[in-house]
Amino acid sequence: MNRLSGEHSPYLLQHADNPVDWFPWGEEAFTKARNENKPIFLSIGYSTCHWCHVMAHESFENADVASVLNASFVPIKLDREERPDVDRVYMTFVQATTGSGGWPMSVWLTPDLKPFYGGTYFPPSSRWGRPGFVDILGEIARVWQAEPQKVQTSAESLTAQLRGVERVGATTTVPGAAALDKITADFRNMFDHVNGGFGSAPKFPRPSELLFLLRVWALNLANRANLANPVNNDARDMALVTLRAMALGGMRDHIGGGFHRYSVDEQWRVPHFEKMLYDQAQLTIALLEATQASGDPFYADVAEDTLQYVMREMTDAAGGFFSAEDADSVPPEHANEPHPHATEGAFYLWTADEVDALFKEDLNNAAAIVKARFGIEPTGNAPADPQQEFVGKNLLYTAQSIEQIARHTGKAPDEVERVLASTRLKMFEARGSRPRPHLDDKVLTAWNGLMIAAFARASRVVANGSRYLDAARRAASFLRDRMWNATSSTSGGTLLRRYRRGEASIEAYAEDYAYLIYGLLELFQTDADVRWLEWAETLQRRQDDLFWDEVDGGWFSTTGRDKNVLLRMKEDYDGAEPTASSVSVNNLLTLTHLVHEPQWEERIEKTFRHFGSRLEQIGRAVPLMAAALATSIAGLRQVIVVSEEAGQAGRAGEELRETIRQRYLPFTISLNLDRADRGALERKLPFVAGMRAVDGKAAAYVCRDFTCHAPVTDLAALEKELA
């Protein structure tokens, strides 16, 4: 057992029994490298990463490979989800020197942590056009011994280049609507009109893109002068088609709910099977906005199915949300072997024989309906793969509609739906007896913030959403109680990033603050408890103190205090996880329409100018920043529904809220004031003071720039105000 056995990271603990003499990232390893003049081998990954498992099994569990690593290097293992600051630095290096990146990431460093060689997955010996790991280790060890100064000079040069990487420059003014039109046109040029999504395989869910497209559509709907622009008219349809394709394809778990990480193919059929919390959160929000923008309940149904999966499988008993589920698990047929080998997707794949056996006594032709619905073939529908793991197996996707199955079976559509509902439950129960994928049970503040936002939004959008509000409240309370130390610093408190099994650690990064503030602002709009708003405001001020770039604008990812992190980076790409700056601008747009703070208004403008050239030239890289720009151009308003009285007034309040719920209002902050004791809230938000029901009836107040129209009490009047 190596030095990782005392760590809390599930990823590091997976490697605690390796023959490799792993160190965690820290001074002990750095000192050893300096004292022994050895290069560092840094391996970065996360616990649910399929290719991390492959490389571990092939190389890090191999005693011969371990002996080379231990003799010539100081091996360090790092969890990218715990330390995104370190991961980003060396990922930038790997992408710059190889043209691509990913995990596992393998980087060789000098003892002073400067990188000189790197890549991602390496097979143990040369194959698939990739150099073998053992050969690379031998050559690097040889060069280090023979020409150490050459390696050191190269590392110095490469590090200097990283520090001098040119970012797209700022603009003197904030970009306008023309930038949004160009970004939308760029998306349209990349749109896959056949399969949905953008570009070709592999296809990754990137909900920020979809949120941008929906906002551009809403902005142009409000500004009817722009409706003649067909590109912007297409914005909503691109988002809806893409979300529907994801939901019907194999990237969605049709039995247990939730979404897998990405699609290997362009048809959204073949997933990479891991499930990440940040995907569940962001896709849920996109689906909820899609159902409001389209009026189609399909999207809300998928969103609720996803939330139910998170509540069932990814929620701590105290209310926090776990990070991920693995892609790999032990195939059921090998579960009882002495040393079973996990394979990708084993938990989710089905054979036709399994389906036939499960429903052999069913009189509703259930097996045939299930096979028709999910494209299940006798010899399997999965493509060939290098490890032959999918042979004879079926990946579930929506192959036929309810109507198609009804025509083929002679059953009524509602009867087909009943059969599929009952068979889904039976398949879920049968699948539950299989060996489950590994669950990464650490709680990350950032990803929990996104998930709080999703649950809070769902409680406002779907009917009878009170259980989703409860989930959001519990998670927010979990973070406040375990991850926030309000008295730890004279400058405003300390937020922590990671909690696992009773231990909270690692000071939070800008994304942790930004995502949590986002979640709290969504929660406050559902549950007008002033504590959520006050905490969001406190966190924003603390985030600004730690991460704001006073010179250029935007928020750095780190504080810059850790000298072992070579670069203080400011992210400028909204990928699977959006940048802290993009989320923060959206947060400030909301906060400044609740709390008067001129400094925040200045920071919004300064950030837009900092990202101005990027928005104007390559806006597809920052779609959430572009969505914030659309919000800024549209302007935000507040809609407050007051219904503190019970009985008829309470029911009227529900009707007013239902009117708001059904509409897509991305440029509206909504509040529900149904508390009898509103003193603290009114002191915080003076503009709501005096808002009361009218003549015993629930009332809605529509406000802009803290100035409110006369209250309305009937639905027709509210519809007119909202329009």
Image: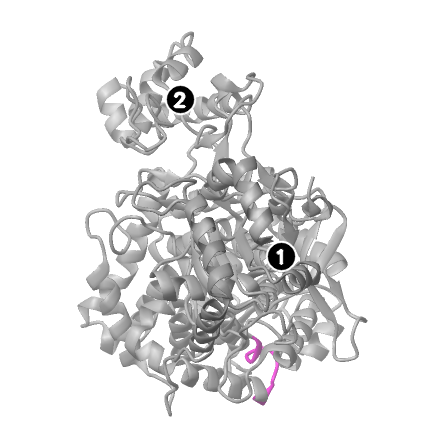
Residue beneath disc 2: 419
Chief secondary structure of the magenta portion: loop
Q: Residue at x 50, y 19 (%)?
A: 334
Q: Is residue 288 visible?
A: yes
Q: Nearer the viewer, residue 194 or 414?
A: 194
Q: Residue at x 43, y 22 (%)?
A: 423
What amino acid is labelled 1 in the image?
Gly
Residue beneath disc 1: 650
Q: Is residue 491 magenta?
A: no
Spot occupied by residue 321 in the image (x, y as percentages of width and height): 62, 48
Furthest residue in direction right, as rendered: 487
* Closer to viewer: mark 1 or mark 2: 2
| Left or right position of 666 against 543 | left
Q: Secondary structure under badge 1? A: helix
Mark number for residue 95?
Answer: none
Q: Is residue 715 visible?
A: no
Which residues are drawn in magenta?
Answer: 591-598
What amino acid is labelled 2 in the image?
Val
Spot occupied by residue 255 in the image (x, y as percentages of width and height): 45, 31
